[in-house]
Amino acid sequence: MLYTSILFFFGVAFGYFIILPTSVLFLAEFVLFEEAENIWRIGDVINFELTVLFGTGLVFQLPLVVYYLSLIGMVTPKFLKKYRRHSIVILLTIAAIITPSPDPFSQLLVFTPLMILYELSIFISRRVEKRKAEEAAQEELERKEAKAKSEAASESETEEKKTEE
């Protein structure tokens, strides 16, 4: 729960300090034609800002999504590395949706942390896979030890019965 809040907070902070200033500047300077005037209503501005902030906070949850998908075995680091090119296209599309301005600078500004989060997700998935392998090895070791103890106990019982006879 703590990581969810931290990642969401970083996403909202990124949206507030990076995306919103460039987006609002673009929208303020955007002129379709000279006769049209930009009329800003406070409700529309707040709705736009909340959408951007919530969207960036949500997108910053990517490492947690990958963590849980790795835990249940749906995602592996090999899979994430194999489809990295596809993810770049998807992340660029998400960046284009999040930023209202068509300029490539704003889209790259959003894409860069998304790509960093994707690479972080690969690292997280690798750690989850390694931890699962260690737990499986530990369980196997415990199972072998329990089996050895069981066999030793049954052998000692057999020897006791033979000595009693």
Image (spheres, helix red, strand yellow):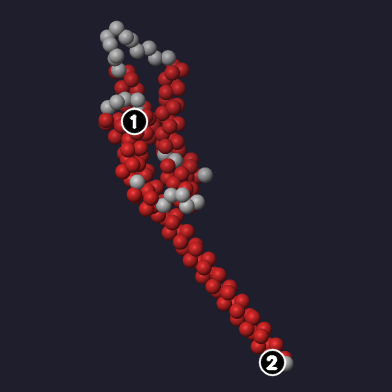
Q: Is residue 107 above or below residue 148?
A: above
Using a 10 Å C-alpha cutoff, classify the residue at mark 2 as few (fewer than 14 neighbours), some (14 to 19) or many (20 or more): few
Please name the amino acid that badge 2 sits on. Answer: Thr
Q: Position of residue 41 (x, y in %)?
A: 42, 14
* Residue placed furthest toward the top: 35
Please name the amino acid that badge 1 sits on. Answer: Ala
Q: Is residue 159 above or below residue 95?
A: below
Q: Which mark is residue 156?
A: none
Q: Position of residue 10 (x, y in %)?
A: 41, 38
Q: Residue at x 46, y 59 (%)?
A: 131
Q: Where is mark 2, residue-wise? A: 163
Q: Which mark is residue 96?
A: 1
Are discs 1 and 2 less than 8 Å apart at CB? Answer: no
Using a 10 Å C-alpha cutoff, classify the residue at mark 1 as few (fewer than 14 neighbours), some (14 to 19) or many (20 or more): some
* Quarter residue 87 falls in: top left
Left or right: 71, with 118 as reference point: right
Q: Residue at x 42, y 55 (%)?
A: 127
Q: Position of residue 67 (x, y in %)?
A: 46, 48
Q: Residue at x 52, y 44 (%)?
A: 1
* Quarter residue 42 falls in: top left
Left or right: 14, with 69 as reference point: left
Tell me the element at label 2. helix
Left or right: 108, with 42 as reference point: left
